[in-house]
Image (cartoon, rainbow, N blue to C red):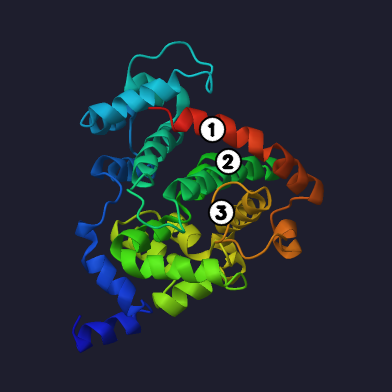
Amino acid sequence: MTQSEIRAAAERGVPPIVEKCLREIRHIATLPVVTIKMMRLADDVNATAEDFDTVIRNDPALSFRILKVVNSSFYGLPQIASINRAVLLLGFNAVKNIAISASLHKLFRTKNLDPHFDTRDLWMHSVAVATGARALAEKAGFALVDEAFLAGLFHDIGIMIELQAFPQKFSEMTKRLSCEPGLTFRQAEEHVLGATHESFGTALCRKWNFPMKLANVAGYHHEPMQLPESDFVLPAIVYVADVLAARTGLGYTRTVETDTVDQWVINALNLSEADIETVAETLPNAVQEVQEIFSCE
């Protein structure tokens, strides 16, 4: 990057290393174009089941995966033979979640070259957060249950970008984490990379024109209290689910800095301590079920 590019990135509040990464994003394995189109369709109030069918038909493997999941015991529906029918019965968001979970699962199976970090553990953590976020949204009586699941799957996407864009630095970072138990994941990121996975995740969402609510989750799932009230709910739900997933030891837990949920956040979400404990207790079994369904080949 030139000095003028570095200054421009700084003025926009983007760390230079994040700006550099985004300029080279085409060299990084990201979500398939068909999945990105589906995310945008799901936010389009004028989209139809036929629109989804047209997009998904261009990816036979994804079509097969969606129909296999839709016809599993998870949904308990009669046999469905077409994407169009699946969208009509389940809704746009449910089909979108299936497609994105399939795409993310493939992305998180990137060849592992780091002895201190396994992408499969990060995938397990993401599934746990997604499952917990969905349960919390239901407990709180929010209408964004499907969005909560997707947000949980997506919240740590910045880590995958770091791993792929800077494998040597990432390995240096995870080695440092293994040697310094008191060091947080974000502190290690700042020391070695000069930016956190929140910055990378937010920048990726903006690069691909994802909904702002996903960008907020990627950027503020550790500190949702920094967001205005209008943007607070989804990142806050993911923040709580993140803590619960780590508390129950599901997947890679080093990214989570506490095992205590901030009481102010619990109150702001209209949840109770009993709600939190119920979700935590049922999370392992719920995650196992979701993992079996959404990871099926």
Q: Residue at x 49, y 73 (%)?
A: 188
Query: Upstream in the sequence, badge 1 or badge 2?
Result: 2
Question: In the drawing, does residue 145 fall left or right of residue 203?
Answer: right
Q: Amino acid at mark 1?
A: Val
Cα distance, mark 1 to mark 2? 7 Å
259 lies above or below 133: below
Q: Badges 1 and 2: C-beta atoms under 8 Å apart?
A: yes
Q: Position of residue 289 (x, y in %)?
A: 57, 29
Which residue carries the number 3 mark? 234
Q: Residue at label 1?
A: 290
**Amino acid type, label 2:** Thr
- Quarter of the image for residue 57 reads top left
Q: Which residue is mark 2?
A: 131
Residue 182 percent coordinates (x, y): 62, 73
Given the image, on which type of amino acid does mark 3 rest?
Leu
Q: Is label 3 in a helix, a strand or a loop?
A: helix
Q: Report the side of 264 relative to 83 (left or right).
A: right
Q: Quadrant of the N terminus?
A: bottom left
Depth check, mark 2 against mark 3: the one in front is: 2
Furthest-top residue in this view:
78
Q: CA distance from mark 2 to mark 3?
A: 14 Å
Residue at 45% in and 77% down: 190
